[in-house]
Image (tube, rainbow, N blue to C red):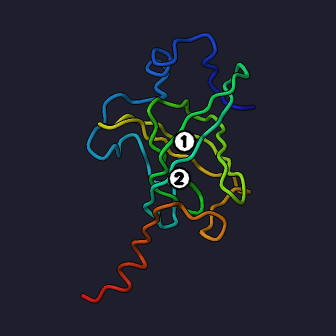
Amino acid sequence: MACRICWKNYNFIAAAKHFGAIKLRASRADMRFMTERRSEVRMLCADMVELSWKDCGGKDWRTVALLEDISASGACFQLEAAIPLEVEVHWHSPKREYAGWVRYCVYREIGYFAGIEFHQSSRWSRKEFKPQHLLDLKRLLARTRW
């Protein structure tokens, strides 16, 4: 099953507003709508990837997204348009394919941000995929002497 909500017969934005799949206005830090689910350290990064998914009607969708941060269990992507909650998404790196579920999609001043929880078999490691720009704050702070 590709998703739990079928968007086939709806205007996407109208349906998303109705079912609460996206939030059009961000509150301070969006903490009312997003709860932190990742226990691993997030690494800030920047890289362009192509996300793909199927809607409940079987239609294939693709979009280019900016990878914002990543951890072993998930990632955050910036998108130009919203993506439905609970949809299974895929993206490729040179060494492997990643897959996961959309857990949140919120609009902020510069676009939509979607949180993807990776499948257990798609956990990320730096050895398999290193984004073009990657900042490990933990390592950076360890090298810095106060």
Mark 2–mark 1 Cα distance, whole angstroms, equals: 10 Å
Q: Secondary structure at mark 1?
A: strand
Frontmost residue, 64 versus 104: 64
Q: Position of residue 69 (x, y in %)?
A: 46, 56
| Label annotation for residue 75 | 2
| Mark 2 or 1, nearer chain start | 2
Task: Determine whether 74 is above or below 127 in the image.
Answer: above
Q: Amino acid at mark 1?
A: Arg
Residue 2 or residue 70, whichever sits in front: 70
Q: Residue at x 30, y 47 (%)?
A: 29
Toward which corner of the image does residue 141 lie, by quadrant?
Answer: bottom left
Q: Quadrant of the N terminus?
A: top right
Looking at the picture, does residue 68 appear above or below residue 2? below
Task: Please state the horizontal and vertical placement of residue 100, each as a whole percent of the image.
Answer: 65, 46
Say which amino acid is labelled 2.
Answer: Ala
Q: Residue at x 74, y 57 (%)?
A: 121
Q: Give the residue drawn at x 44%, y 52%.
A: 68
Which numbered disc covers residue 103?
1
| Image position, residue 10 (x, y; %) | 56, 11
The reply, left or right, for residue 60 in relation to residue 83 is: right
Instruction: Please state, as top left, top right, bottom left or bottom right, where the C terminus lies in the image.
Output: bottom left
Which residue is at the front of the view, 136 or 23?
136
Toward the bottom, the furthest residue is 145
Residue 110 placement: quadrant: top left
> SS for tag 2?
strand
For residue 38, the mark is none
